[in-house]
Image (cartoon, coloured by chain):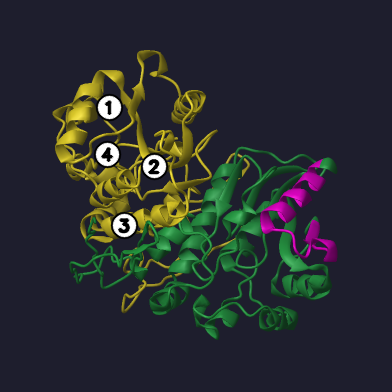
Chain colours: A yellow, B green
């Protein structure tokens, strides 16, 4: 059996760290049936979750809680979001939206337009199993803050005559509170806000969002790009010529 | 005009950094024609390049050289590669390859099976404009080391009866030196090694690789996954049910 050397670095992304603790050990490989199963430490979780190599995870690795907390709170998350905004503007800078309001950018809501970080701060940054009723209760308070870089991007795009479509996995029953929350933190004048109907309650994110995008196209909208913190926001038909993945190391929606 | 706050953190991914230097400034936005153009600092380069938000860059940002150097050299790059290997094995663990050798995994070569880090160490980690003749000279020395996690993965997969296809943007003229280099560092017994023919010299990476994959399918191979450091290794038809993006903050191939 192959043995892979693992370095437990003193920081998760210790690019500038003065020292790192490096040791030999297996990757916790074991045989299950006829297969070799390997487990790694927290240290590569960020890269592998964000590029979509790690899929199907329901909680962040236990030992990552502190690292994810630091990423979310120390400014790096905000800076990475600003980098996304810059990349979006760079992509759109040579495209002039038509006068008809049909050239649109799709924004996801949770961890894209709005932040649920206040909720996740109380729930171990994703190290606790997701509690749907409790999370819905938080959503229905309607107090999620804006993500500053995305709010700035939204305003720049609107000033340039882009239409904005909000498309969210939140349900129709949360339409009013979601609109009010968006308005309260500074978003306004969107083209449309699309939420899950009761009939779509059990549809996968990719299927639900693809169907909504195809409907938009059918109504004459030209979708140039989709922005979301989940790869499932960016997969399927009619996402646009380019898509933009926003950082979110706290949860994964398949 | 919107002003976005930028924090210049004392480390690029300073999740565990004790302190960060945070200051207010614009993102260097300026008007070009009727468009707003924004520039960001180095700090979000890693995230945005690796998730494919930042495209079309020809060199890394000048100010990122030191950070990229640290990432490549301090162990984090190796750890992230190990995380990729774990994710690949996790995906393939429930699939049993057939006896016919037609179930295959596609490995890219540069920055996937082999590392050009010794070359990039001498060329500012991608901060210098790519010099094709000079890089070819390095390739033709045939001394690129293996990427340890990928070599381990390769051996585990072979032991489980997976076929391995090497598919590279290197040219047919580099076939012998490439094979020898792979053998010298421990790869052996691959199913096939596919390189660019002279007729494919000016084909885009996505088009060239897609054509090769479709040819493989035509020959009866079943492609389960593609591994590469470039998103262009993972786009187009017949990449497999899942793909795996390996870290590479040094260069970008569209």
* Dot 3 alpha-carbon crowd within 10 angstroms: few under 14, some 14 to 19, many 20 or more: many
Spatial CA distance of label 1 from label 3 is 30 Å
Q: Quadrant of the N terminus of chain A?
A: bottom right
* Secondary element at tag 2: strand
Q: Which residues are magenta?
A: B192-217
Q: Chain under label 1?
A: A
- Above or below, comparing residue A21 to residue A251 in the picture: below
Labelled pair 2, 3 in contact (Cβ < 8 Å): no
Name the residue beneath numbered marker 1: A132
Q: Quadrant of residue B53?
A: bottom left
**Do marks 2 and 3 share a chain?**
yes
Name the residue beneath numbered marker 2: A228
Spatial CA distance of label 4 from label 2 is 22 Å
| Sequence-earlier tag: 2 or 1 | 1
Total count of labels: 4
Left or right? Give the position of B211 relative to B47: right
Q: Which mark lies nearer to you, 1 or 4?
A: 1
Identified at 51% across, 23% down, the residue is A218
- Residue A128: mark in rendering: 4
* Secondary element at tag 1: helix
Spatial CA distance of label 1 from label 4 is 12 Å
């Amino acid at each position: 059996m192959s043995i892979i050397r693992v370095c437990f670095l003193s920081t998760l992304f210790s690019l500038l760290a003065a020292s790192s603790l490096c040791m030999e050990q297996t990757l916790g490989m074991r045989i299950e049936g006829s297969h070799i199963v390997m487990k790694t430490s927290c240290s590569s979780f960020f890269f592998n979750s964000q590029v979509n190599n790690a899929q199907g995870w329901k909680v962040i690795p236990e030992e990552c809680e502190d690292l994810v907390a630091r990423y979310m709170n120390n400014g790096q998350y905000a800076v990475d979001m600003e980098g996304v905004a810059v990349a979006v503007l760079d992509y759109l800078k040579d495209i002039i939206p038509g006068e008809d309001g049909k050239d649109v950018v799709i924004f996801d809501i949770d961890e894209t337009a709005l932040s649920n970080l206040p909720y996740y701060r109380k729930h171990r940054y994703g190290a606790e199993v997701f509690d749907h009723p409790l999370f819905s209760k938080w959503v229905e308070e309607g107090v999620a803050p804006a993500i500053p870089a995305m709010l700035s991007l939204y305003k720049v795009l609107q000033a340039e005559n882009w239409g904005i479509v909000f498309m969210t996995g939140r349900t129709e029953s949360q339409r009013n509170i979601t609109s009010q929350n968006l308005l309260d933190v500074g978003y306004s004048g969107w083209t449309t806000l699309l939420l899950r109907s009761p009939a779509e309650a059990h549809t996968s994110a990719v299927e639900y969002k693809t169907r909504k995008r195809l409907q938009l196209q059918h109504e004459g909208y030209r979708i140039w790009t989709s922005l979301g913190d989940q790869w499932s926001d960016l997969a399927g038909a009619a996402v646009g010529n380019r898509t933009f993945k926003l950082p979110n190391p706290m949860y994964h929606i398949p």
